[in-house]
Amino acid sequence: MKVGDVTTQHNEEMLACRSDNNLEEASSLLAEHNIGVLPVRDGAGGLLGILSERDIVRAVAQHGSAALALSVEDLMTRDVVVCSPHDTVMNAMKLMSEHNIRHLPLIEDGILKKVISQRDLMKATLKQIRLTMRFVDDYAKSNV
């Protein structure tokens, strides 16, 4: 199965923030939409970075409540691990495990297509396992 075929938990239009947003604005978006990361996009749809809940917790731990006024650009992760929609689910899971991340942006032709989570990949994998089990069960019943 390809990563681009995985349905994300949040199928509405992909949320993103700008690098000049402050942490309070970005945190509000995360909370309002119950998501764990916000991609930071440029005007052409490219990925500048990603702001995660972990980034926010680190900023608050270091700066206290003053962190809310800091810009996303100051706090975002710039060296983002990404994959292509044509990569396999297994490859995406391996990347997440190796880099200790829970979200993975999918980039195609330099444009951010969507962000998938470990939960998205787990659900897709379980669905595939169930389909395989049903196929094997049906095959076994028909060849008795």
Image: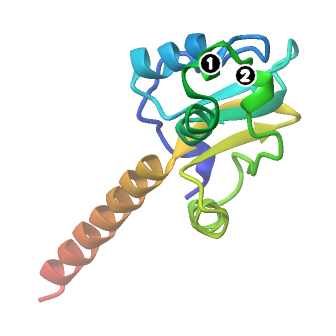
Q: Residues within 10 Å of mark 2 (few under 14, many from 20)?
A: many
Q: Say which element carries label 1.
A: helix
Quadrant of the image for the N terminus? Answer: bottom right
Nearest to N terminus: mark 2 or mark 1:
1
Figure check: 81 above or below 98: above
**Which residue is found at the position 45% from the left and 29% from the top?**
35
How many numbered tags mark residues here?
2
Q: Which mark is residue 66?
A: 1
Residue farthest toward the bottom in the current orientation of the protein: 144
Q: Position of residue 47 (x, y in %)?
A: 81, 30
Figure check: 101 above or below 90: above
**Which residue is found at the position 80% from the left and 24% from the top?**
73
Q: Position of residue 29 (x, y in %)?
A: 51, 15
Q: Which mark is residue 72?
A: 2
* Mark 2 vs mark 1, CA separation in Å: 13 Å
Q: Nearer the viewer, residue 29 or 120?
A: 29
Quarter of the figure with residue 51: top right
Q: Position of residue 94 (x, y in %)?
A: 62, 69
Quadrant of the image for the C terminus? Answer: bottom left
Q: Amino acid at mark 1?
A: Ala
Q: Position of residue 97 (x, y in %)?
A: 58, 67
Q: Residues within 10 Å of mark 1 (few under 14, many from 20)?
A: few
Q: Nearer the viewer, residue 19 or 60?
A: 60
Q: Nearer the viewer, mark 2 or mark 1?
A: 1
Q: Amino acid at mark 2?
A: Val
Q: Which mark is residue 82?
A: none
Quarter of the figure with residue 78: top right
Q: Say which element carries label 2.
A: helix
**Which residue is found at the position 84% from the left and 26% from the top?**
46
